[in-house]
Amino acid sequence: MKNICVVGVGYVGLVTGTCFADLGNRITGVDIVEERIANLNKGILPIYEPGLEEMVKRNVNAGRLKFTTSYAEGLKDADFVFIAVGTPEGVDGEADLQYVRQAAIATAEAMTKPLIVVNKSTVPVGTGDWVADIIRQSQPSPIPFSVVSCPEFLREGSAIVDFMNPHRTVLGSLEADAADKVAQLHLPLRAPIVVTDLRTAEMIKYASNAFLATKISFINEIANICEALGADVKEVAAGMGYDGRIGKQFLDAGLGYGGSCFPKDVKALAHMASVQGKHPQLLQAVMDINGDQRKLVVNKLRELLGELDDKVVGLLGLAFKPNTDDMRDAPSLEIARALQIAGARVKGYDPVAMTMAGRMLPNVQLVDDPYELAEGCDALVVITEWNEFKNLDMERIKASMRGSAVVDGRNLYDAAQMGQLGFRYRGIGRGYNGK
Ligand code: UDX
């Protein structure tokens, strides 16, 4: 059992701290947002993540997990401090490290005994050295510490599963004994542990996300070619996936990737390359393809509806992916804006992200279920592949709509079946023009 302080109780820090508590450690979550800490101490979570609310409550009740705004309290007995604060996209795509800096300074000022500082946030290559310098410069008097990079590989919507069943744990440090101590924390997960230097560990994170994003843009480019040549990209992906070197996952063509990681991390990696005089042509192409995917929806709607002026379009799903309320860089944001600029009236529904949507989609009429969404619509667009959209009563949907157009942005439906139901259907890469 170890004492761990986790700084930043957001998407990554809250899951990391709660899961380490569930493994028997004593965790103190620290955050500078007082309301977030006050809510957590009342059992109200700042994020939606399946299974997390129950796990937080269980570990708080067991006395293994608590929350505070005080670094002094958080670090008092800590053997480790995990820095899990946000690293949002900054100018030119460079990661904004202001919160990491604040956390490093506050840690240096509050620590009272030797500490292992673990960088959990996704940070540019070289940040580990930078954090060490900040701590050294900020300590009122020298206290020994080590820095270890331990990047997260959590997918929103399955973060607890991903934490408890990692493909691997990656650790980077210039001090083997520090890396070993962090490795010990992860032994109960019974997964491979890669131990390397700081910069290599930081690069493994970026390269992993950039590769996954590349797979997505690759299959989306293939989808666009399939529409010209009459092939079905879903079948293409299935046929490809049997090859172990390719793999079945991350070959779902659609509206492209969003969220708080892929867009930011690919841009940050390209920026790191560019400032070193390298030319990240492939990363740039990945970003360009991804940006174009959202534009497909308006083009397909124009094909189906003609001019979009005064048309009513319903967006099925608003979150950037299923099983989350996160709408950061969600395709719904850009698509809603483009439709409104084209003169359409936009309605929206999401099973979970409605509060977030109210803040981020002010001019979209938000409704309470898919059938209310369909009422009076000339077209429906599948934006997020929520399970509940997979078995809708399509006859009821059709009867509620004013028109019959469906743009299936995540290839949920069978084109032939939709045609038989009287819909004018367009998927992504589903044969000629997506029909
Ligand atoms: C991702 C990485 O998977 C995770 O390892 C890393 O730690 C954080 O970033 P996340 O962004 O939460 O996780 O979700 P993920 O399931 O990876 O989806 C990312 C985006 O890609 C979503 O917008 C999703 O809709 C899209 N996607 C995913 C596709 O368009 N096609 C696919 O086949 C898979």
Image (spheres, grey):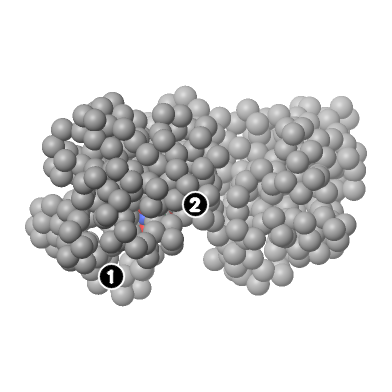
Q: Position of residue 125 (x, y in %)?
A: 54, 40
Please provide percent x and percent y for residue 229: 9, 57
Looking at the image, which residue is at 47% across and 47% down? 368
Residue placed under numbered mark 1 in the picture: 238
Q: Position of residue 398 (x, y in %)?
A: 26, 55
Tell me the residue at 36%/68% (across/down).
247
Nearest to N terminus: mark 1 or mark 2: 1
| SS state under label 1 | helix
Residue drawn at (76%, 45%) of the image: 40
Give SS at disc 2.
Answer: loop
Asked whether 302 or 195 is in front, the reply is 302
Q: Quadrant of residue 330?
A: top left
- The vertical placement of 265 against 253, above or below, is above
Label 1 CA crowd tier, 10 Å (few <14, some 14–19, many 20+)? some
Q: Which residue is mark 2?
A: 351
**Picture residue at 13% right of the left edge, 42% below the top:** 303
Up/down of 224 relative to 394, above or below = above
Image-based side of 28 in relation to 92, left or right: right
